[in-house]
Image: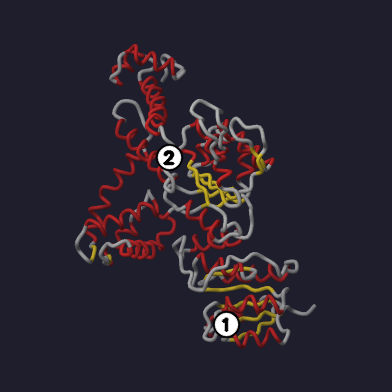
Amino acid sequence: MTAATILVADDDRSIRTVLSQALGREGYEVRTTGTAAGLWKLIESGEGDLVITDVVMPDENGLDLVPRIRKLRPNLRIVVMSAQSTLLTAVKATERGAFEYLPKPFDLRELVGIVARALSAPPASAAGYTAELGEGDERLPLIGRSPAMQDIYRTLARLMGTDLTVTIYGESGTGKELAARALHDYGKRRHGPFIAINMAAIPRELIESELFGHEKGAFTGATTRAMGRFEQASGGTLFLDEIGDMPIEAQTRLLRVLQEGEYTTVGGRKAIPADARIIAATHRDLRHLVRQGLFREDLFYRLNVVPIRLPPLRERSQDIPELVRHFLGQVVAEGLPPKTLDGAALEALLAYRWPGNVRELENLVRRLAALYSQEVITREIVDAELAEAPRQTEAAAAPPGPPGAAESIGTAVGRHLQDYFFAHRDTLPAPGLYDRVLREVERPLLELSLAATRGNQLKAARLLGLNRNTLRKKIRDLDIEVVRGLK
């Protein structure tokens, strides 16, 4: 059997030598060139069973060569290498027809494995989707060149041309919505709307109306017909953020939509086709919620078609310098004076654990740019700012408890409202927000207070500063179960 021939194009002689030796040891024939013109000559002559090409070469961009290769020889597999390892590079390589994108520096064993897969793969289709990315399009929806982020970029690029349902996992502040927006903005539904809804920020009794809309007269206060998020997202993408906080009764209706591909409005009877790609996100472990009975197992499998885990910032600390440069550039564009961080200040950022992840880093950079007049930010300034961060983060993360927990409850409510307004940043929330927030806060506050006093209503009333009869009425109105002697 004749050995496969690999064509390698890279202007770096050392890379050509390393690849030639590694692939030769695997039994392949290898032809190398340092230019795009040299590669094209080999391809035109009919040589090669697979191409490995760099992006930046002296005479032509390797990405521009890919469509020409695909047109002349549609079944010739192409692996693109690049030191410009951003999400946009991965997307461009994929949408132009590359079999695989490999960021530099790469692992030789991984490259050899990709070559074997490419050579054994079935014939490629010449058709595909195109993201229509302009040559000058340098927007970076996600920042970082660490190996962890390279894996994310390649996964996202593979999903751009599909309608597969995706669930994005990650701690708060890791960029889950940015990843969802990238899937939309560079995918085949990019010309449709991107609609986001935060499940943790919507009162339980309004979630079904928010998702599916309602008819006039469907419930008290429904004076007109209202479109739901599914209808608003038709032809585009519906982003269900914090899906782990979705009430179980709403999960049932969402499952039916995913199964049947249609839904009805609240109070409506006519089935409406659902035409939106679903991307979900959560900071919670959905499998654990399934075991607890808090999340439907069948819905989990419908949503978890392609799971993506975004790494916390502490797992990709090498991206911090690039993120800092990006955020400093943003604040300058917004009118703040330019700043730089000295080496010691950057070391302090690298040593910090970042419980709030990229969002916390962005907030810190903005604070440094806005509050300090120095052009060069020193370690002393950074240390002073970070010294407050752990206490703030612990307070925000602590679960609300009985006596003495007012600060934690207030912080949690504040974060809840912040998420709610973020979800409605393009349009103001529906009227009645004050009463809705009170309803959301009042029930857990009473339940926590009763739990802390082991069901003693007199003690709970004193703790809350309420008249005992007032507390009794609220317990009755909210249908709260009081368990005496609770430990």
- Residue 306 at x, y percent in the picture: 61, 51
Residue carrying label 2: 429
Disc marking residue 318: none
SS type, badge 2: loop
Q: What residue is shown at x 31% (from left), y 30% (from top)?
A: 405
- Residue 27 at x, y percent in the picture: 70, 78
Quick one: label 1, few (<14), some, or many (20+) residues within 10 Å? Answer: some
- Residue 236 at x, y percent in the picture: 58, 52
Q: Does 418 sit above or below residue 59?
A: above
Instruction: Report if residue 33 is visible in the image.
Output: yes
Disc marking residue 16: 1
Total tally of numbered discs in the picture: 2
Q: What residue is shown at x 47% (from left), y 55% (from top)?
A: 178
Image quarter where the N terminus lies is bottom right
Q: Does 276 sit above or below residue 99?
A: above
Q: Is residue 89 left or right of residue 72?
A: left
